[in-house]
Amino acid sequence: MARSTNDLNAVRMMLGPGIMYWAETSLTFLLSMAVMLHTDVRLTVMALLPAPCVSLAVIFFGRRIHKRFEHIQSMFSDISSRVQENLAGVRVVRAYAQENAEVAQFEQLNLQYVRENVGLTRLQGFFSSLLQAFIGLTFLLVMWSGGRQLLAHRISTGSFVMFNTYMGMLIWPMIAFGWVVNLMQRGTASLNRINEILHEKPTIARPLGQAETARDCPTDVHFRDVTAAFAGREALSSLDLAIQAGETVAIVGQTGSGKTTLVNLIPRLFDPTSGSVEVGGVDVRRFDPEELRQEIGFVPQETFLFSASLAENIAWGLPDATREQIAWAAEVAGLASDIASFPNGLDTVVGERGLTLSGGQKQRTAIARAIIRNPRILILDDALSSVDTVTEEKILNQLASLMRGRTTILISHRVSTVKNADRIVVLSKGRVVEIGTHSELQEQGGYYSDLYQKQLLEEELEAI
Ligand SMILES: Nc1ncnc2c1ncn2[C@@H]1O[C@H](COP(=O)(O)OP(=O)(O)OP(=O)(O)O)[C@@H](O)[C@H]1O
Ligand SMILES: [Mg+2]
């Protein structure tokens, strides 16, 4: 955020006023110099005596200003992300009564920021005063040497006055020069920070040669000997799994078993450490990621809504969606009756990150967003966890008829979500440990049948 606002501004100052004054001062300097040389060479040499000192000062201070400014900009980044986090997480801050602690930390950061800025201002102040002193020195030298020549009648009063007038014209360029150096140093420091991001090579990019076309490709998904590791720790270990086109596959497993990691590999949110993921028999790395993602409806585990209307949130991935399409998607996602109860219906604004919606409403909005694109592969990562079982069943039935002939992957911790899937896969520590239909797995007596027994018991207890 800081790089795209504050740093951008510093670059703008360098490219606008910076370059303009650079041109102006250079031109004034050159022309005045020409006239001065023409009037009296010896006096011009005198006037130029302090110039090497000026250059040294510019180099010396320029470097320090540059370094300090870079540091200050990175501090500004820290402060803005801190504020952003606090605003986004304001309810957590309140719930834990951490307002004062957060304010104190913010103040601490700001004090540091002020200190650094005062340091920079001191440096700049010293630099510009030094430049002024050099200007004074130049005048002193010219007055002294020119005055003596005037007394000795070696130059005329007219020439001396004229010389001094042109010298006076050099004062502004010299001051402006200091300012320009300052702008340039700030601008290049900020440009470096911006370039760091612009030159970052995305690890997930189009293949170098001709990309395979993902449109209308078969939708069977094949994981071949897939290992995915984060910082050396394996989230998936040599996993093999084949999902037929048109199949509904459910994935269950303990928390941290690698379910999310597995489905993230399909739209290439990241790539496996080794092994490959194939869609329609083609390694996903050979598709254009953008085209591949067009074919996939993805509902992530953590719902993210934008601060816009429900309709805009649903049509997010399909900007030219019609009103009918939006209403249809909301209907399939089981959101229609909720929408009817909102004052502005589909045009209700949901607040930052969907603040004004319930957890289940948020999840169903995210589902509607995925299905409006008519995806050929649908991935729901625990997307029904906040919805009651009755609503869940209704949504699943509607999805089943919608996804006929297409591939659906459902992740859940609830048996009710997964029991009607064509196949259920149980993951444990990044490996497939059980696979089969609801009744097959129940007979095996493993993790799944345990889960089923427990949830059955819970339901019975609730009924009492
Ligand atoms: N971006 C990441 N960086 C580092 N480690 C990660 C990252 N994403 C996942 N992991 C690790 O990989 C393992 C599997 O995580 P994953 O999110 O796939 O689990 P999950 O089965 O989806 O769990 P849950 O049911 O809680 O959603 C975990 O141990 C987790 O800490
Ligand atoms: Mg997960």
Image (tube, rainbow, N blue to C red):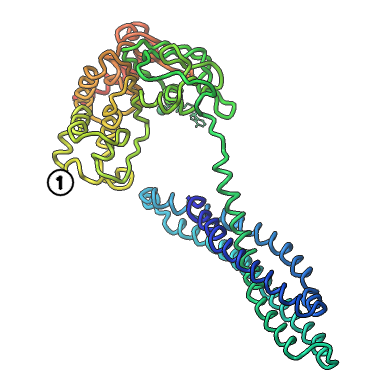
Where's residue 275, x and y in %?
A: 53, 16
Which of 1 and 463 lies nearest the eye of the viewer? 1
Determine the image quadrant of residue 119: bottom right
Q: Quadrant of ligand 2?
A: top left
**Is disc 1's CB within 8 Å of ligand 2?**
no
The amino acid beneath tag 1 is Pro
Check the image and report above or below for 404 versus 198. Answer: above
Farthest residue to the bottom: give it.
151
Asked if one can make out residue 256 in the rendered structure from this viewpoint, the answer is no
Determine the image quadrant of residue 220: top left
Q: Quadrant of the C terminus?
A: top left
Asked if one can make out residue 387 in the rendered structure from this viewpoint, the answer is yes
Which of 398 and 229 lies nearest the eye of the viewer? 398
Per the image, the residue denoted by label 1 is 343
Characterize the local packing of mark 1: few (<14), some (14-19) or many (20 or more) Cα atoms within 10 angstroms: few
Q: Is residue 109 left or right of residue 421?
A: right
Circle count: 1
Q: Is residue 430 left or right of residue 437?
A: right
Residue ID at (70%, 84%): 162
Determine the image quadrant of residue 19: bottom right
Where's residue 425, x and y in %?
A: 38, 14
Where's residue 191, x and y in %?
A: 58, 51
Say which element carries label 1: loop
Check the image and report above or below for 217 versus 339. Answer: above
Q: Is residue 422 left or right of residue 169?
A: left
Which of 187 and 368 lies nearest the eye of the viewer? 187
Q: Is residue 272 left or right of residue 136?
A: left
Check the image and report above or below for 418 versus 199. Answer: above
Where's residue 139, x and y in %?
A: 74, 82
Residue ID at (37%, 52%): 94
Residue ID at (81%, 91%): 150
